[in-house]
Amino acid sequence: MNDSTSDAAIGRITAEQLIARMEQLEISQRALVFAYVGLDISLAALARELEITVAEARTRIQEGLMALRADEDVQLLAGISRAGGRADFHDHIQRLQLEAWFCRWCGGFQVQKGRGRLRLTCSDRCRRERYKITQLEGA
Ligand SMILES: [Zn+2]
């Protein structure tokens, strides 16, 4: 087994710098970059959800990555989602102000459609599962 405690500590320090640079990206571009590099969500899935072509999604991600500090940031980004558990994931999402873009249950990419209340989950299934658990935790 490796020393996951110190790995996580290093992850957190460097993640701070990455998050600061990510904040310079426009919000939908930030969500795309995080979803693709950090969460390994496919270009096809992202394009479908955003209703753009795969080529457009690729270009937007490439442009976003150019605004970051290339290799160093990309590696960091790829590492942060795997560095911790569920709590860390939600922490990153929150600090990147991307709560609206990822399902609170499965972490999948989602685009808010139309106006009105913020959609917390990507599907009815996730909504039901999340509800079950929040019922247990609440009260
Ligand atoms: Zn979901």
Image: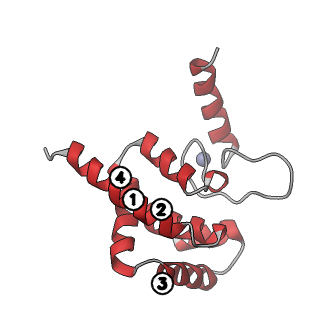
Write the residue at 46% across / 77% down: 68
Give the residue number, with chain letter if any, for mark 2. 19
Give the residue number, with chain letter if any, for mark 1. 15
In primary-sequence order, the first of circles 2 and 4 is 4
Give the residue number, with chain letter if any, for mark 4. 12
For residue 56, what is the image quadrant?
Answer: bottom right
Which amino acid type is shown beneath numbered disc 4?
Answer: Arg
Residue 20: tell me if it is visible.
Answer: yes
Q: CA distance from mark 4 to mark 3?
A: 23 Å
Q: Is mark 1 within 8 Å of ligand 1?
A: no
Which amino acid type is shown beneath numbered disc 1?
Answer: Ala
Which amino acid type is shown beneath numbered disc 3?
Answer: Met
Write the residue at 43% across / 65% down: 18
Label 1 element class: helix
Write the residue at 49% across / 70% down: 21
Q: CA distance from mark 2 to mark 1?
A: 6 Å
Neighbor class of circle 3 (other Cα within 10 Å; few <14, some 14-19, many 20+) is few
Marks 2/1 in contact by CB < 8 Å: the verdict is yes
For residue 54, what is the image quadrant?
Answer: bottom right
Give the residue number, with chain letter if any, for mark 3. 66
Residue 8 in picture, x, y percent from top left:
29, 48
Q: CA distance from mark 3 to mark 1?
A: 18 Å
Q: CA distance from mark 3 to mark 2?
A: 15 Å
